[in-house]
Amino acid sequence: MIKITDFDTNLYTNFLTEVFPKVFPDYNIEELSRCIDLTGKKIIKCAIALYDNIPAGFMFYREFDEFIYCEYIGVDEKFRNKGIASEILEKICKSDSKQWIFEVEKERSENKTSNIFRKIGFVENPFPYDMPRAEEINPNAVYTLWSKYPLSRNDFNHIYTTLRDDNDF
């Protein structure tokens, strides 16, 4: 059984420290520390997926006025192919009427990640996307933007500007 719970620093920091670098090997551990720090400051949220009460997956996300932005979503390799990522998306994203935004490395968007997003009903946006902070996070990656609902060019530009200008991003 899969259960989604809020992040508790005392319970799940070790899990994230172990799993995050495996899920995102091209990213540095400082990025995880930044996310945990911003979670403690209530700037972003973290959901933990438990599989039979064992931490198995996570999602860092942030609420803006008009949309919710997913920083990271990942599943421990020991628990892959059990529907955990889909469950996180279904329980958190689909239950909220706001627009959800995901940046996905193009390489990942052309494989299983895109299949999960499509299955849940998310759409890949056709507009060219130059991720803010890409040089700091993973300078070799090309990103694409996925969303819960199709975006107009104006909505896309607004979201991009909001993310680019955000000091905590």
Image (cartoon, rainbow, N blue to C red):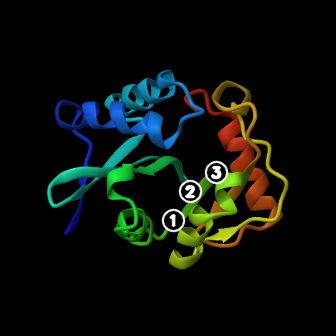
Identified at 79% across, 52% down, the residue is 157
Q: Position of residue 130 (x, y in %)?
A: 79, 43
Identified at 69% across, 51% down, the residue is 159
Q: Residue furthest top?
A: 30
Residue of label 1: 98
* Residue kind at label 1, given as amino acid type: Lys
Is label 1 in a helix, a strand or a loop?
A: loop
Quarter that holds the N terminus: bottom left
The alpha-carbon separation of the residues under discs 1 and 3 comes to 16 Å
Is label 3 in a helix, a strand or a loop?
A: strand
Q: Position of residue 140 (x, y in %)?
A: 75, 35
Q: Is residue 111 above or below residue 103?
A: below
**The disc label shown at residue 124, or none:** none
The residue mark sitting in front, 2 or 3, is 3
User: Going by the image, does 87 lie left or right of 23?
Assistant: left
Q: Residues within 10 Å of mark 2 (few under 14, many from 20)?
A: some
Identified at 39% across, 60% down, the residue is 80
* Residue kind at label 3, given as amino acid type: Glu
Residue of label 3: 103
Residue of label 2: 67
Asked if disc 1 and disc 3 are in contact, CB closer than 8 Å, the reply is: no
Asked if disc 1 and disc 2 are in contact, CB closer than 8 Å, the reply is: yes
* Residue kind at label 2, given as amino acid type: Phe
The alpha-carbon separation of the residues under discs 2 and 3 comes to 13 Å
The residue mark sitting in front, 1 or 3, is 3
